[in-house]
Image (cartoon, rainbow, N blue to C red):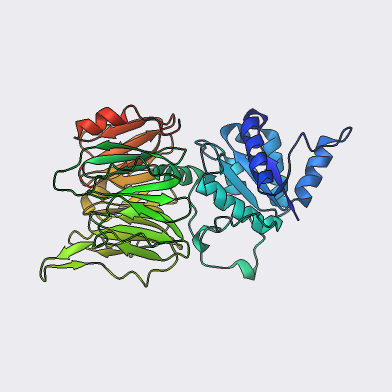
Amino acid sequence: MGYVFISYSSKNQAAADAMKKLLEKNNIATWMAPGDIPPASTYAKEINSAIRNCACMVLMLTNDAQNSIWVAKEVERAVHYCKPVLPIQLEDVVLNDEFEFYISTNQIVAVNRIDETYAELQRALAAIRSYTGDTPSKDPVSPPAPAHHPVSSPQPSSSAHKTASRPHPTAKQSFAQEMGKKLAVGLDHAIGLKNDGTLLAAGTTAKNIKYDPCDVQQWRNITAVAAGFFHTVGLRFDRTVITTDKNTDTSNVSDWTDITAVTAGAHYTAGLKKDGTVVIGGPMYIDTASETLITPDVSSWKNIIAIAAGAFHLVGLQQDGTVIATGKNDYGQCRTKKWTDIVAIAAGNDITAGLRADGTVVTTSVEENEIAAKWTDIVAVSYDGYDIYALKADGTTITTSYNNKTYSDVIALSSNCFGSTLFLKADGSVIYEGSEKSIENKTKHWNLFK
């Protein structure tokens, strides 16, 4: 069986040790300097040999790692020897020219610490096993869907690799999308996902709502959250789904399996399966002409890598960077067929927004496009029903709103369709922007990293 070479900066020793411990706990052999360098040996010789003979490299990606000449040399050697490189991003990192050259096309696993309960790390372990040939002691979480291939180093061009081009998000964009799974905001409630898989909730429950969207205190092992008008959705570690809406006529998700992402519209829930297909629970909208509840057929959707729910429409990002949409289209919110090079999507009640790999934004709204088209260096977008909010690579926010209020040190954001947005800051704190004072008063005390 092969082994994993762990590349890291000595300033991130604790994280590297934790990664080594996690790998070995899962019966995966590791090699890590200086502990695995024999006495009286030459560092350069032993490290070069270890990289040449490893099955793959795990790169502990931090700003310190980027500033380390030794880490840079190790990554260069891995690329030279055509070794798969799996970057584990532990903090906000803007790839410098050297690292962008080496790993900009690699799928990055973004986590804020090494914790074996994280679904992202479990999927990374499955990918690593595919390189090392190790057999897990118990059934692991399956590798990512075809849309999320395990990362690999750039390979020499050949006819075997001449497949359809696919846009790749930057490290910053990947990190923002991953952290965005920790936030959800509904009509009158907000949800935050903590690192331990439990949830924080804030808000009030309307008197005519049977099931409390804030009734999530007993949920465990959650890896992503979403919120509709009056319901909360959680994606569990085992890739099943839980919701506060117990009415099976409007949100039948109890039998879903192999789900990798969830999103929620006004009264419906959608899930992305690991095979790239999509499932919908509950009616999406009411056809006013026939007065019937409509749940669009998405059985033809294939190779989907991300989904975003508007109030009454659903958007899917396809593997090739194009976007598909279904549902109500009274404002042109489903007119996305001409979009290309998209790496992330967002939807509201009447608008869809797309984030391109080059950090620019496109929307279905002519009015919003006049402003958003001028933006650059964007890593995440959301729409609150009135305005588009975007997160820039430097951690500041920008908006199409007339008040142009901005925040700094932000790493993720999430909006609803009625003027509310949550911002997750780098220290784990949360900012709520909206009209619900009860949510604002409670979320200002949140910390999702503690």
Residue 8 is left or right of residue 303, and the answer is right
Front position in the image: 387 or 371: 387
Residue 30 on image: x %, y %: 72, 45
Residue drawn at x 27%, y 61% as measured from the top left:
248
For image coordinates 70% across by 49% down, the residue present is 28
Residue 56 can be seen, yes or no:
yes
Residue at 37% of width from left, 47% of height from top? 225
Residue 318 in the image: x percent, y percent? 42, 62
Residue ID at (33%, 43%): 216
The quarter of the picture where the C terminus appears is top left
Give the percent coordinates (x, y) of residue 121. Answer: 56, 47
Q: Classify 440 as above or below 317.
A: above
Residue 173 placement (x, y as % from top left): 45, 45
Q: Nearer the viewer, residue 59 or 390?
A: 59
In depth, the one of 296 and 351 nearer the eye is: 296
View extreme (front): residue: 218
Closest to the observer: 102 or 204?
204
